[in-house]
Image (cartoon, rainbow, N blue to C red):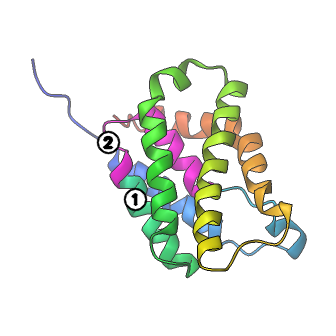
């Protein structure tokens, strides 16, 4: 039995870079609270599609990059993304067979959990958010999930990422 050759690592990296760029994209004041959590969305997709390649370690590294880019406490997003990746990899066989609307509910739960971990850490350091609008990115992420899933799936198939 020959080992399966891994390919398409550049595509994975480029999707993470695109997600980070979308996180930094300037938006009008009214739209900032609606910005989806792009990095966790892409992380969830790759953890579902390739759990052997994208897992907790990649989640941790992505979270550290987000912490540096946002100037937040080092490790808070890393912890949240590692937990999201762990749960996604652990449940990937079940989540993958769900229809897209049920996957969107799972994504909502995972992103909200990540936000809960970040707000918990911010609360410990005295930076807790003031309003309920902090939780809107979980909702917009779930709404965007079906389209992001289809786009990333097509990219994965086109470039034969395995």
Q: Nearer the viewer, residue 18 or 34?
A: 34
Q: Position of residue 70 (x, y in %)?
A: 58, 77
| Residue located at (84% from left, 62% from top) | 133
Q: Position of residue 135 (x, y in %)?
A: 77, 56
Please report the bounds of the magenta region as a residue range.
38-57
Instruction: Tell me if residue 53 is in the magenta stretch.
Output: yes
Name the side, left or right, on which 54 lies relative to 87: left
Q: Which residue ends up furthest to the right in the rendered image?
A: 30
Q: Considering only vertical position in the picture, is 12 above or below 119? A: above
The quarter of the picture where the N terminus appears is: top left
The disc placed on residue 60 is 1
Nearest-to-viewer mark from 1 and 2:
1
At mark 2, the secondary structure is: loop
Q: Residues within 10 Å of mark 2 (few under 14, many from 20)?
A: some
Name the side, left or right, on which 155 lies relative to 61: right
Mark 1 vs 2: CB contact within 8 A: no
At mark 1, the secondary structure is: helix
| Residue located at (61% from left, 36% from top) | 149
Instruction: Tell me if residue 60 is in the magenta stretch.
Output: no
Quadrant in the rendering for residue 53: top left
Q: Nearer the viewer, residue 41 or 119?
A: 119
Name the side, left or right, on which 33 lies relative to 157: right
Q: Residues within 10 Å of mark 1 (few under 14, many from 20)?
A: many
Q: Position of residue 20 (x, y in %)?
A: 55, 65
| Residue located at (81% from left, 60% from top) | 34
Q: CA distance from mark 1 to mark 2?
A: 14 Å
Q: Nearer the viewer, residue 128 or 47?
A: 128
Q: Of helix, strand and loop, which mostly describes the magenta segment?
A: helix
Q: Considering only vertical position in the picture, is 30 above or below 49? A: below
Q: First in sequence: mark 1 or mark 2?
A: 2
* Residue at which label 2 appears: 53
């Amino acid at each position: 039995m020959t080992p399966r050759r891994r390919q398409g690592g550049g595509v994975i990296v480029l999707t993470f870079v695109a997600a980070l760029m979308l996180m930094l994209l300037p938006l009008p004041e009214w739209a900032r609270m609606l910005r989806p959590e792009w990095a966790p969305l892409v992380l969830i997709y790759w953890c579902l599609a390739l759990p052997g390649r994208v897992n907790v370690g990649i989640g941790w590294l992505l979270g550290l990059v987000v912490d540096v880019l946002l100037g937040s406490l080092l490790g808070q997003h890393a912890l949240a993304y590692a937990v999201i990746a762990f749960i996604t990899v652990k449940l990937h066989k079940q989540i993958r067979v769900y229809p897209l609307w049920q996957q969107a509910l799972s994504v909502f739960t995972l992103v909200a959990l990540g936000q809960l971990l970040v707000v918990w850490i911010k609360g410990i350091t005295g930076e807790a958010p003031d309003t309920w609008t902090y939780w809107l990115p979980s909702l917009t992420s779930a709404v965007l999930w079906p389209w992001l899933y289809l786009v990333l799936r097509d990219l994965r198939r086109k470039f034969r990422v395995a």
